[in-house]
Amino acid sequence: MTIILILACLFALLLVGVPVAFALGGLGLGMLIVGGFSPLMAPQAILSTLDGFILLAVPLFLLMSNVLLKGGVGRDLFAAVQAWVGHWPGGLAVATILSCGLFAAISGSSVATAATIGTVAIPEMVSRGYDRRFVFGLLAAGGTLGILIPPSIPMIVFGFVAEESVIALFLAGIGPGILLVGLFIGFAMVHARFSDSYTPMPKAGGSERISATLRALPSLALALLIVAGLYSGAFTPTEAAAVGFAAALVITALILRTLTWAGLWEAIRDSAVTTTAILLIIAGAKIFGKAIALYRIPQEISAFIAANIDGAVIFILLVSVVLLLMGLVFEALSMILIMTPVLLPAAMALGFDPIWFGIFMVIMVECALITPPVGLNLYVIQAVARASLGEVARGVLPFLGLLLLTAVILFLWPDLALYIPFKW
């Protein structure tokens, strides 16, 4: 009953327009006071949160992705991939998904992936006769690869909250990320097979392929540097983000010469705004999490599940429904910050591996990124394409189904996520 009352209060605050960070922090502070706990626990919780070294990776990854966005790196990546696969059935769609996957391996940001590749791919695909709703859905869903294919900002936050290895989470995201890329590409090619509205592209010549690949080579080298550094143990996630940001500056400002001073300033400003919003949400969620821990709500939920839910299937279905419903109201990081302290103890009590559960939560959060009314990727594509929100939302429905299929496969085959981190 207590958790229902708390969630009702939280939804009420959000419905009247209170920002998520202040709704979480204010409700948590109120719970501390009402429960007879010291309100000084709130600033203590904030300080213990924001001094985490791993959180430094968040602004650095954001800086890197924004520098790459302003430097037009997405255009080079897309052109290189298009030169190799553009003549396939639905070749531009395939190139779009592969470009999203490559940029996701650099940036760690869903919004940056959708915006960077969408800016280039949407005009090209629409001009070739691809169905507009399909194009918008493809880009919105392709952007979600930014938080599943490592590095991933939501994985960093989950690892911080759950006190689990971020590197292990990154490794666990590789298998599901590759699977999702394959499912998206398969759907794009099947869609093209039964559609006669688009104009196929001619096969690129050898010189064109080499030229496009050389142009994208610095960006591909950056992706390789981050991935190799992380998985070899040479970099921590924070160090990888710092090295990636420095490399992104060298690539865009000195090698490609596409980053202007104005673009750099915009990248810094946008990263600062987003970082501030993220850290405020983390601070508010930490106060809220401290309060629900003192109220022993996670323990009560675990006891309730143990007594009333028979089996892992029912639990996962319940978790999926809860996260999908929350995705209608909350954005990605808020869902992770609110629900991880509540759900993870119950999941572990039922025998779920915390790394596996983190990947499962990230996939469900991906669904939240493309479900209205709060799905951020929908608004990014709407802004890039100057389309209506309804048109974009209808286009993502098949891809939402593929995301849910990935979650089902992950449940039936846990080694999809766990094999690499446990065998590495």
Image (tube, rainbow, N blue to C red):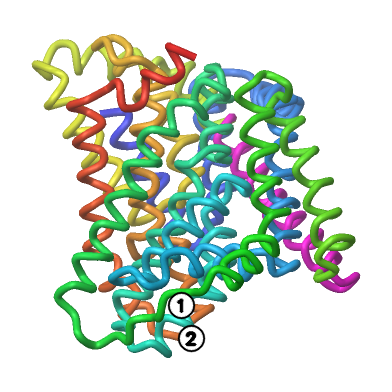
Q: State if disc 1 and disc 2 touch (CB < 8 Å).
A: yes
Residue 123: horizontal and vertical position, in percent?
49, 84
Let me know if residue 286 appears in the view. yes
**Image point 27% across, 22% down: which residue?**
414
Residue 82: horizontal and vertical position, in percent?
49, 69
In-front residue for pair 43/267: 267
Vertical position of residue 403 compared to residue 343: above or below: below
Residue 360 relative to residue 220: left or right: left
Let me know if residue 52 appears in the view. no
In-front residue for pair 227/238: 227
Q: Is 26 part of what is drawn in magenta? A: no
Count neighbours of disc 2 (C-alpha within 10 A) and say few if under 14, some if 14 to 19, many if 20 or more: few
Vertical position of residue 151 compared to residue 161: above or below: below
Q: Quadrant of residue 319?
A: top left
Residue range corresponding to the magenta coloring: 259-286
Residue 279: horizontal and vertical position, in percent?
67, 42
Vertical position of residue 307 compared to residue 312: above or below: above
Label 1 sits on what residue type? Gln
Residue position marked by numbered label 1 in the rendering: 382
**Image point 77% across, 62% down: which residue?**
267
Q: Residue furthest front?
A: 206
Q: What secondary structure do most residues of the magenta stretch adopt?
A: helix
Structural distance between the alpha carbons of marks 2 and 1? 5 Å
Q: Which mark is on residue 7?
A: none
Label 2 sits on what residue type? Arg
Residue position marked by numbered label 2 in the rendering: 386
For the N terminus, give its image quadrant: top left
